[in-house]
Amino acid sequence: MNVSTKQEGEITEDETAHDSQKESGEEPEDESHEEVGEDTQEEPKKETKPKRKRFFSRRNKVLIVVAIVAIALIVVLWGAAPPDYDEVRDIVKNRGKYLGDEVTVKGKVGNWTGGKNFTLVDDKNASFAIFVVHEKAMPEGFAEGKVVVVEGKLEEGEFGLTIISTKIQVGCPSKY
């Protein structure tokens, strides 16, 4: 509030500015002369806090997404998924568990004479063997001693455990 001393009949600068604003219809800049009973509420001043850097800024979000994608690619390319086949020794040891079911078995071709029947032996212990009857033509590259994956139904036949095969996959063991 401007305090000024005035003598009777003198007009101060504040009063002159106030009067000229009233005549022009403008609101006075500083309404220090309030009338009693008038409801005036001042808006509380909002304090602005300094902005903190957020951990999940755009840059950090992008880095997190890139890291997740990289980890997913490593897992997929590394072959972290378990194999989709059983070993011959597992089938022979647990025949009751697999008998009558569709199986996928990895082993080595043994005792094949060029027809559609052969023996599939365990690649680590040749004493475990399953007789295979294949219903289709033999795949290219099929030969005795090759590692293959056989799919088909496991049954008890005249030669012991027998797979009635619907598919044979030939290839390098690292691809299995």
Image (cartoon, rainbow, N blue to C red):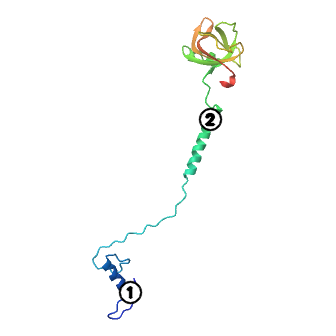
> Within 10 angstroms of label 2, few (less than 14), some, or many (20 or more) residues?
few
Q: Is residue 131 left or right of residue 4?
A: right
State how many labels appear: 2
Q: In which quarter of the image is the N terminus?
A: bottom left
**Residue under numbered circle 1:** 13
Q: Is residue 42 above or below residue 173?
A: below
Residue drawn at x 36%, y 71% is 42
Q: Residue at x 55, y 51 (%)?
A: 58
Residue 85 point in image, percent of width and height: 61, 22
Residue 112 lies, with reference to residue 60, above or below; the image says above
Question: Residue 102: x, y in percent?
Answer: 55, 16
> Residue 57 location in percent, x, y?
55, 52
Which residue bears the numbered disc 2? 75
Residues under labels 2 and 1: Cα distance? 82 Å
Horizontally, residue 112 falls left or right of residue 54, namely right
Identify the element where label 1 is drawn.
Answer: helix
Q: Do the residues labelled 2 and 1 touch (CB within 8 Å)?
A: no
Q: In this view, does 50 lie above or below 117?
A: below
The quadrant in which residue 41 appears is bottom left
Query: Hey, what amino acid is under mark 1?
Result: Glu
Q: Nearer the viewer, mark 2 or mark 1?
A: 1
Disc marking residue 109: none
Among the two numbered marks 2 and 1 on one chain, the one whose residue lies closer to the N terminus? 1
The answer to whether residue 80 is above or below residue 55 is above
Point out the residue furthest to the left here: 37
Q: Percent x, y for residue 138?
A: 64, 11
The kind of residue tagged 2 is Val
- Seen as rendered, the residue at the extreme front is 24
The residue lying toward the viewer, choosing from 15 and 72, is 15
At 35% from the left edge and 94% from the top edge, which residue is drawn?
A: 7
Q: In this view, does 123 lie to the left or right of 58?
A: right
Crowd band around label 1 with a 10 angstrom C-alpha radius: few (<14), some (14–19), many (20+): few
